[in-house]
Structures are given as structure tokens and as C-alpha cells.
Amino acid sequence: MTRLLIPPLLNRRNFVCAAAGLPAWAWAQSDAPAARGARKAGDARGDGPEGLEAVLTAAGALEPLQAVVVSRHGQRLAERAYGRRALAAATNIKSASKTVVSALVGAAIDRGVLTGTDQRVAALLPGDLPRDPDPRLARLTVGHLLSMQAGLQRTSGPHYGRWVASRNWVRSAVAQDFVDEPGGGMLYSTGSTHLLSAILTRRSGRSTLALARDWLAPLGGFAIVDWERDPQGIYLGGNQMAMSPRSLLAFGELYVRGGLTADGRRLLSQDWIEQSWRPRTTSVFNGDGYGYGWFLRRMAGHDVRYAWGYGGQMLYVVPAAGLVVAMTSDESSPSARTGYRDRLHALLEEIVTRATG
């Protein structure tokens, strides 16, 4: 497993030392008897719920971090809010909402609203196509939108402001120039997931928010509090969705249970979850795999599936361990180029180790 290069303030060693009530320098002399004793003390005191609570206390040093909630096999192991935040307060989960849109597409297929991921976008949005469409648009599928392989110019990053300033976000997204073939490399774009939101609305005759509140209603603890819409009233697929950290955790628990609610009601098919977690391309951001709205990575000796939103809005699912971890952060600062996302990954590894050790 490739180890992340974590800034020294909050690397794995510091978390263990903080959990054991020891200074980080105790690790510097790794061969010294005192250091070996410190390591043993940290290991002895770090396992189980008490160890998790200590890890979450140490995580308070991550200033952008607002909340962490951890569950295993449906049982809440630990949770913590930082600063003036509350665990029940709604947070803009940013691009982590792309994973929710993916779930709604799966639910639509399960219910016959859509026939499958091979459906052509041109046939689903005929009234939104440009007058003289690029021939490649005829090959674009729902699956390409889900895996960020549309081939269309991105509407995220430096292109986002111009896109949301357009009069019609759906038509603008589908009219972008092709910079790759459909099914080619990853082109991470909120426009792609917004097209999915438009498809869900057009095919069902209901808003995407109404579908979410209906199809996911039996999922206890899950609630979308607010969600931005485009000028035509289509809910923004893949951004600007608000929910609490506990709600985000509840959504992850649906996946770790294989699409079932806690009382056994099926909301998503197991087949859809397996499709969503199948690697289809490689992230341009960090080299991780990417499926249908989920990033895929090996962490702490486990296969981890995660949703990631700007600023550090994270949902981690560790299927083999039955573990789900939701983290929310200040949405105003980037998380990738600052190294903050990697620190959250390191925190997740520590939580996995404590919860499963």
C-alpha cells in the first residue's frame, strides 16, 4: 500500500501519541526504551470506543474540520463536532452530493424509470441538444456521465463560474465542446451530474429532490435540508446540497448494508452498488480509481469507497469492516492542494485501525 506523505502536525504518529496522552516527540527516538513504551501505551489505550474518542479529540487540531461521525454494523461508535458546529446542523456537502445523484440513478433503474446505464443522453434530453450537435453526442451514455467520462469540456474548476452564469445550465453542459471521446479519460465535471439530474426530472416528471425524499424516505436519519436549483428549476446535480453529518452517515450505511435499510427494506439493488464500486477510470486528482460517483482507494489494509466534496466533505465506506465514517469541514477552502484531504485520509486510516483492531 502506498503511504501518503502527511504533514507532520497530524500524521499517523501524532494521532497515536495524542490518543495515548503523549508528546509527538516520543516517536522520534524509535529505538529508545521510552519510545517503545510509549508505543505500547498508545496501542493499549487506543483500541475500542475509548480509543476512537481520543482520536477524535486529537483530530480537533485540524482547524477546518467541523464534525466526524463513525458507525460500524449500524452501531454509532463515536461522534464529535468541533468549534461551534452541531452534529445535527446542515452542511453544504458540495461534490459529495454526486454520490447521492448516483444513488438516485440506480434507484431509477431499479424502478424502471430508466432502463440502464447504456441509455443514450441524446434520446433522453432531445429538447436540450444544440442545433448542430457533434456526432459524438449520439454515443454519450448515462454511464459516461456517472463515471466522468463524457468527453465534454469540464464545467468544474476554472469553468464553473461561466457555466452557472449561463441562462440554461442543462443546454450549456450538453453543448460543451468535446475534448475527448465518450468513454475516454476522466473529465471531472459537475455538468455531467447535472445532466443526470435533468434526465431524472424529465423521465420521471418529478424534481430530483422529490425523488430523493420519496425513494430514500425509509432511510432513517437521512434528510436533504436544502439544494440549489438552476434557472429552469432543475436541482443542481452534484453540488450545493445541504445535510447534516449524521444524514451523510446514514446514506453511507445504506451502501454498507447492500442497499437495505436498518429494518431490511430494499432501496437500492446490490447489483447497482457493485456497479457503482467497479473501477471505470482513474482520478486525475490523486490517481485513485473512480466508479459511478465513488472514489476507490486502498487504506489501512482495506478497500475503501469514498465521496469527496470541496473543502473536505467526506463519506468513507469500508465494506469488509462494516464501517462508515462521515466528515464535514469548512466549505470555503480547497482540500486537495493544501494537503488537508490527505490529512483526512490519515484520520480515516487511524479510525479504521482503532475500530477494527
Image (spheres, grey):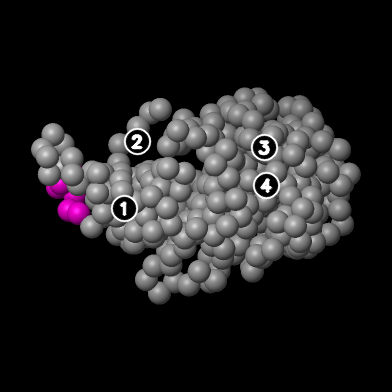
Residue position for label 4: 257
CA separation in Å, label 4 and label 1: 30 Å
Mark-to-mark CA distance, 4 and 3: 14 Å
Q: What is the secondary structure assignment of the residue under circle 4? A: loop
At label 1, the amino acid type is Arg
**Residue under circle 2?**
4
Residue 289: percent from the left, percent from the top? 54, 31
Question: Is 85 covered by the magenta stretch?
Answer: no
Q: State the predominant SS element of the stretch in magenta.
A: helix
- Closest to the camera, between mark 4 and mark 3, is 4
Amino acid found under the numbered disc labelled 4:
Arg
Cβ atoms at labels 2 and 3 below 8 Å apart: no
| Residue 179 coordinates in the image, percent (x, y) | 59, 29
Give the mark nearer the N terminus: 3 vs 1. 1
Say whether residue 110 is left or right of residue 321: right
- Magenta stretch bounds: 22-27
Q: Is residue 161 above or below residue 184?
A: below
